[in-house]
Amino acid sequence: MAGGYSIRKIELQDFHGVVSALNVLTTVGPITKEDFASTIKHWNACKIANDIPVYNPYVIVEDASGEVAATGNLIIEKKLIHGCAICGHIEDIAVSEKHQGKKLGKMLIEKLTEVGLQAGCYKIILDCDEKNVKFYEKCGYSRAGIEMQIRK
Ligand code: COA
């Protein structure tokens, strides 16, 4: 990847970097290294097929420092509709503050989109704040639907 950064799947060594990057998005809470490891283990165990994981968590790492600059996940859902098609959901996109504005967010979305399309997803969707609509439009996404929730 150009510009001194590399993109790859999340690894156990990314614990502190991923938690720190996610803190720009929301509260991560007091998770331990063991919580992180068991979540990665769970993610790795969930499969749509042998070569298609349900969870596709990625990080962008700065080559010089080894620092996690960005993280995001693509979750692939198996449906009944459209002939048991699969649909991608992009979740938990975060670029740490000092690495923002360097096109890393765009590279991450492009990578997750490519992974989803290569797996055979008929669509890839995500929720975002109004303030990030332009960013996602620059990544090729367009407005569709309205998000609703029940929240505890
Ligand atoms: N509003 C309008 N345009 C934006 C934007 C915003 N909020 N954020 C980025 N852009 C534009 C950039 O100017 C750039 O445009 P260009 O290609 O014409 O120069 C393009 O989108 C790509 O931007 P990029 O440098 O890849 O953005 P980034 O690496 O800073 O990542 C976020 C963008 C939103 C992911 C990042 O700022 C972030 O993590 N924010 C905090 C957490 C968050 O809101 N996550 C998203 C959850 S839905």
Image (tube, rainbow, N blue to C red):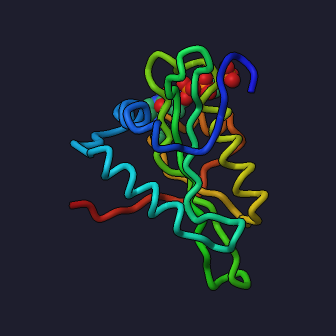
Question: Is 95 displayed left or right of 140 in the figure?
Answer: left
**Residue 83 % position (x, y):** 73, 85
If the image is split into quadrants, where does the N terminus sit?
Answer: top right
Kindly tell me whether residue 99 is visible in this rendering: yes
Which is more toward the observer, 35 or 57?
A: 35
In which of the image's four quarters is ligand 1 placed?
Answer: top right
* Residue 64 picture quarter: top right
Kindly tell me whether residue 130 is visible in this rendering: no
**Residue 77 % position (x, y):** 58, 70
**Height in image: 30 above or below 95?**
below
**Residue 40 % position (x, y):** 45, 54
**Height in image: 63 above or below 55?**
above
Q: Residue at x 78, y 58 (%)?
A: 118
Question: Is 71 displayed left or right of 26 in the figure?
Answer: right
Q: Residue at x 60, y 50 (%)?
A: 143
**Residue 148 % position (x, y):** 39, 62
